Image (spheres, rainbow, N blue to C red):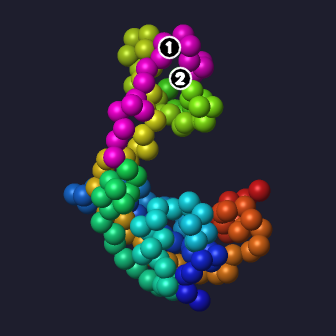
Amino acid sequence: MNITKDTVATVQLQVADRLGRLIQKTDEPAALLIGGYDNTLPAIEAALEGQAAGFQTTLELTPETGFGERDESLVRSIAKKDFPPGVKVGGQLEVAGEDGQFQLYTVAKIKGDTVFLDGNHPLAGQHLRVTLKVVSVRAASAEEIAHGHAHGLHGHHH
């Protein structure tokens, strides 16, 4: 079976920086619902389109095709006293913006009584080398399509 819209591609994934230093590697293959459901980057979906189990490739992603450019307006600070207890660097929280939409922030650093938050994706602004290997391909279930993500083996469990 080939990867097309409304299939689930189970892939092994490795992400490195432009110098080849490993950033992330999946221990277990990841199940991706293909077809514009925002389960992965559009560049990864495009590379997988039409492929079958056994396909391997390495993609060179720019910030534009990866996680976007850094947006310094998404870096903010708040007083430590206004932050939930147990704040640690690397921790995450959702903050409601003026428009009521929630934005995920990562605690970038803590300096004295100030907590610095970063709303950028941790890989924003980076050139990346993504290596993919397709382990299997199957038709997505109606439930997976309705939910917009893969279920079951290596996917999301409800």
Q: What is the secondary structure assignment of the residue under circle 1?
A: helix
**Which image quarter holds the C terminus?**
bottom right
Q: Is residue 16 visible?
A: no
Residue annotated with mark 1? 80
Residue drawn at (38%, 57%), measured in percent from left and top?
A: 66
Q: Is residue 35 above or below residue 68?
A: below
Q: What is the secondary structure assignment of the residue under circle 2?
A: loop
Residue drawn at (32%, 62%), measured in percent from left and top?
A: 61
Task: Single out the residue that lies furthest toward the front.
Answer: 99
Q: Is residue 18 magenta?
A: no
Instruction: Identify the amino acid type marked 1.
Output: Lys
Q: Is residue 54 above or below residue 114?
A: below
* Residues shaded magenta: 69-86
Marks 1/2: CA–CA distance: 8 Å
From the top left corner, tell me how far across and down residue 31 is, in percent.
59, 68
Q: Residues within 10 Å of mark 1 (few under 14, many from 20)?
A: some
Work out whether mark 1 precedes mark 2 in sequence or the reverse, and give the earlier one. 1
Cβ atoms under marks 1 and 2 closer than 8 Å: yes
Residue annotated with mark 2? 87
From the top left corner, tell me how far across and down residue 83 is, in percent.
56, 18
From the top left corner, tell me how far across and down residue 81 is, in percent.
54, 10
Query: Residue 17, located in which quarter of the rendered image?
Result: bottom left
Instruction: Identify the amino acid type marked 2.
Output: Val
Q: Between residues 35 and 85, which one lies in front from this camera angle?
A: 35
